[in-house]
Image (cartoon, helix red, strand yellow):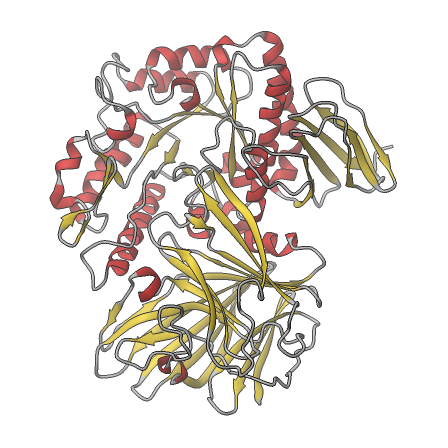
Amino acid sequence: MSEIINTYILGDIQAIYVLDDNTKNPELVLLPTGMEYREQNREKPYADTLAQIKIAGDVYPGGYAGGATMRQSKTAEGFCYVSQDMSIKEGRTDIRTVLQDKRNYKIMHQLSYTEGEKAVRSRCTFFNDGKENAKLELLSSFSLGKISPYMEGDGHDTIKVHRLRSVWSMEGRLETKTLEQLQLEPSWAGHAVRSERYGQAGSMPVNRYFPCLIVEDCKNHIFWGAQIAHNASWQMEIYRRGDNIQISGGLADREFGHWMKDVGPGESFSTPWAILSVCHNESIEPIFQRLTGALENDVNAGPESEQTLPIIYNEYCTTWGCPSHENISKIVDTIKGRGFSYFVIDCGWYKQEGVPWDVAMGDYKVSEKLFPEGLQKTVDLIKESGMKPGIWFEIDNVGCEADAYQKTEHLLKRDGAVLTTTMRRFWDMRQPWVQKYLTEKVIGTLKKYGFEYMKMDYNDTIGIGCDGAESLGEGLRQNMAASLEFIRKVKKEIPGIILENCASGGHKLEPLMMAECSMASFSDAHECDEIPIIAANLHRAILPRQSQIWAVIRKADSLKRIAYSVANTFLGRMCISGDVWELSEIQWKVIEAGMGFYRKISSIIKKGYTTRYGTEITSYRHPQGWQGILRISTDGKAFALFHGFHGAAGMEVSIPVSDKYTVCDIYSYEEEKVWFQDGALHLLISEDMKAVAVYMEKGIQ
């Protein structure tokens, strides 16, 4: 049995701290406010602990756990509850729980809540108050116990696990499986550990999975959600031994991420923050949006120009890595006065004769051939046309044709050899020499030419880690922490700069980086059919106002295709590229109508609630059926976005919408008819691969 230490009401979340009578290990249980905590009489109960930790030399967990999980080791079981306190300051509540073992090692678990938010943050700090060095093999950011306290028995057919998978140009696919499908059903004897540990090892934190986990009690309609705010290796776990279910996450451990950390006497170490939430709802969408909403305050504190979600022009899909004063002049002459606020000079501005852009980064000398009169003339042209100039850097990496590629004493190494992937090496961001070099090359360039926007790309991953620390994983963590500090230095030295987070598109879409940047490249999906599917996926992962979506327009595009491309950007931030100087006036008319529609709905993109409808899409490359997105704001405005894919022609589709709304505008390439019937907004899809958007307001007669 167990007893409740304390219960804290944090908005609509209650944090319940439970102490096991036998182990004296505390557990954290999250429930929606108003739901009563129940202590179930489990047939095969096993207590959990608030902080998952493993110290080298201690006894590893049994039950066939080796290689599968490091949770609930003898290290973790040895940390007993000591004390707990709470403080409230300037709208922030901090709950600190102290655990200690017999060696005088301590862990402080911190749970933080900011008034008005629908999520809490969790992290652990390890203090070595003992006499011997402690070599950490695991230290979690969070661990939640007793999921779900409303579950009966072993909860068969009750619990579902939701994850967001990610591969290049197909980010954010939702994967849903039951505990039974994951083989997390307890054995007849309660013996043998069950664990699903997943994540990624490397410097692209959204490679294979987003650092996100949702667990659902589908009989009681309770959802628990977690995100890890970390720009390197991470892991999540769903764990059980017996009937109880626990989840945890944080830094990838020794087994999963090659991570060990030495903490000497008198030293301490803190984990990354985790973002946690819980809610009682019939649908999965609210729990995702509670997690992403935790960054609202960070983004609201960003550059003033970003608060209206202005439209971007990026020349990459116009010049394909070969920007010049000549072609940028042609673009600017074409688009000036059409409502663009930012103009981004993408990769290649530094490339030398005969060298492709993707193997030349690192030296960052302006190409004299591409900009014969200097880059300043081009920047001035952009500013004179009423747009903020932006420029691309791949800060951390160097290409194989750059002189920097040979500066091996300043590049990352593994096993004593320079860490090299196809075409790239990596700066050792921990070195003062590297920080000074990049300050000159990156910050110096931004200041010299007066750039107001920087696109930060990152096109390969370090993998498991690098030399220079007590483990490869710790080397990686330190390097990526130094990378983040450089980004913060950019923001400090150039106040108000607009930062775009890009990593081969969407491979850094995690909360730590997203809190530092105004927006992110949603994907490297430039002009393919699956763009609206990916863009809709990302409503579950990041704030739509931060999701920059490509609309690449070609001179051969039909008006239907143009409207499809432009409408995709209504799912986030509009970014136009392509053959703009070769388009006809009728093609421009469709684009500019879309730009006008985007401005009408920008406040809904900025602050709203998303629900997704339509066909289950199996193949992204060859989508069948339709997709419907409804986004509603709190001020009586809404928009619906329909996409008809292959096989959709002739389908009558609908999205539940109150008839209290009035249709104010419709965007497509031709006139469209929509109607309200039986509490829904209806549309007849006339053609395959077609998009229709509908803007609505409440209370208009």
Comparing 682 with 640, the one in front is 682
Q: Where is residue 76 in the image (x, y as percent from the top left)?
A: 39, 79
Residue 334 vertical position relative to residue 681 in the rendered view, above or below: above
Residue 99 vertical position relative to residue 384 in the rendered view, above or below: below
Residue 95 vertical position relative to residue 557 in the rendered view, above or below: below
* Quadrant location, the C terminus: top right
Residue depicted at 46% across the width and 89% down the height: 23
Residue depicted at 66% across the width and 33% down the height: 601
Residue depicted at 52% across the width and 40% down the height: 546
Answer with the quarter of the image where residue 391 lies. top left
Answer with the quarter of the image where residue 270 lies. bottom left
Q: Position of residue 343 (x, y in %)?
A: 44, 24
Residue depicted at 22% across the width and 51% down the height: 430
Residue 312 vertical position relative to residue 11 in the rendered view, above or below: above
Q: Where is residue 425 in the image (x, y as percent from the top left)?
A: 22, 40
What residue occupies the far bottom of the structure in this picture? 22
Q: Where is residue 501 in the image (x, y as percent from the top left)?
A: 41, 40
Q: In this view, does 381 lie to the left or right of 473?
A: right
Q: Is residue 279 left or right of residue 77?
A: right
Q: How many marks?
A: 0
